[in-house]
Each structure stands twice: as C-alpha cells, then as structure tokens.
Amino acid sequence: MAQDSIILEQPKVHLVHMTVFTIVVALLGVILFPALKTAFEANPGLNALILAVLLLGIVYAFRMVLRLFPEVNWVNSFKFGEPVDETPPVLLGPMATLLGDASNRTTLSPQTMRSLLDSLASRLDESRDLLRYLVGLLIFLGLLGTFWGLLVTIRSVSDIIGSLDVGNDAASMFGALTENLKHPLAGMSTSFSTSLFGLASSLVIGFLDLQAGHAQNRFYN
C-alpha cells in the first residue's frame, strides 16, 4: 500500500483502555465503599481535595485523547481530497494554514515540514504537563496528610506523657492512659487515610497519562 493512501487510525483503542480502567477503579470504589468511607472521614477536608484533583485529572486525560479525533479526521480528509470541516484543527492549525485546502495543495519544503512537526510535538508535550503536575500534586497531598497526622500523634503522645499522674493507683492511671490514646490513634488514622487516597489517585492519573501519551505519540508518528 502506498504511503499516501494510509489512513490515520482514530485513538479508539487507547480510549477504550482508559474507559475500562476507569470503570474498574469505580467498581473497586463501590465494593470497598464502607472501608473507604471510614478512611475518608478521618480527614474529610484533605481527602475531598484529593478526590477533586483526581476527578479533574480523569476529565483532562480523556479530553487529551478526544481532541485527537477531529485532528485525525482533518488529516484523512485532506489526504484523500475530501471536503474538510470549516472549523480548522487546533493542534494542526499552522499546518492547515500553510497547506490550504484539499483542492489547492501547497508543497512544503522539508525544513518547513520539520518546523511544523517540532511545533506539534512541543504542543503535544505541553498538553501533558498538567497531568504530570497533578500526579505530583496527589503524591504531595498524600504526604502532607501523613506529616499532618504524625504531628497530631506526636503532640498527643507528648500531652499524654505530661498528664500522667504517678500518684494514682495503677487501675485509674491505666484507664486515663487508655482514654487519652484516642487522640494519637486519630492522628495515625489521618496519616494513613490521606496517604491511601493520595497514592491511589496518583496511580490512576499516572495510568491515564500513560495511555494519553501513547495516543499522542501514535498520532504524531
């Protein structure tokens, strides 16, 4: 088959992978909902922020792949001389301007074509910067909750040690110690819950970023 007759494929495979993965994660969330609810309530503010960042990352990852569909349609229409949409492509905008329409093709020099491809590669790479930042942000929020919980635990343990009264009998001192240990345990719960949500969310966004990157690389190549 001649090179000019090759049809660019839509990134449907990558979109299916992302959709199936997101559904599996959602099903796991439903199955583990009672345990996740208990962990979420340990620090609802920070955990809600982590889930909001996760939702933003999922939507943006799907948008990165979906925006390739009109670009592929424009290339295929142009290559085979079919009428193209009046709305110019976004990623291939400079190339569409230089090439004109399918009925009046313009021949580009190798230097110009290389410059256009480098510009396209740069825009594709820049579009992934937000997802990479969100992965790092989710890890940071998980670690932030970890250190927050550890600080609460250390402060509570210090208060318990300072409030111990060795003059009381062993039974009453043990009862007071048991009651005061609730605060350090609450701090540890905060620490582990935010780490759980942060790291799990970063793994989800990381996989979607990987699939979106594969779709973009295939389109560019």
Image (cartoon, rainbow, N blue to C red):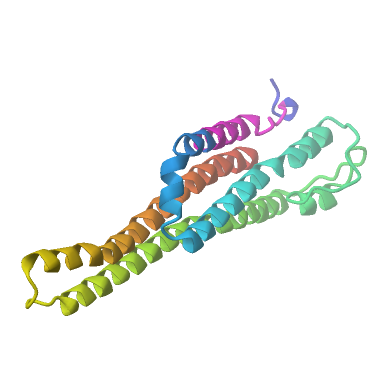
65, 218: nearer the viewer? 65
User: Of residues 35 and 162, which is closer to you in this image?
Assistant: 162
Q: Where 30 sits versus 61, above or below?
A: above
Residue at horizontal 80 percent and vertical 47 percent from the top: 89
Q: Is residue 123 magenta?
A: no
Q: Say if 168 sits above or below 99 in the image.
A: below
Q: Is residue 19 magenta?
A: yes
Magenta: main secondary structure = helix
Query: In the rendering, at what x and y percent does residue 57 appear?
Result: 58, 51
State which region is magenta.
6-25
Q: Is residue 179 left or right of residue 147?
A: left
Residue sitting at 69 percent across and 48 percent down? 110
Q: How many marks?
A: 0
Location of residue 7 in the rendering, given as x and y in whole percent from the top left corner: 72, 28
Left or right of 44 on screen, residue 58: right
Q: Residue furthest top?
A: 1
- Quadrant the N terminus occupies: top right
From the viewer's perspective, tell me whether residue 117 is left or right of residue 27.
right
Who is closer to the viewer here, 31 or 160?
A: 160
Q: Is residue 94 left or right of residue 212?
A: right
Report the quarter where the C terminus lies. top right
- Residue sitting at x 7%, y 76%: 166
| Image vertical order of residue 176 relative to residue 39, above or below | below
Residue 137 in the image, given as x and y percentages of width and height: 48, 61
Q: Position of residue 52 (x, y in %)?
A: 57, 56
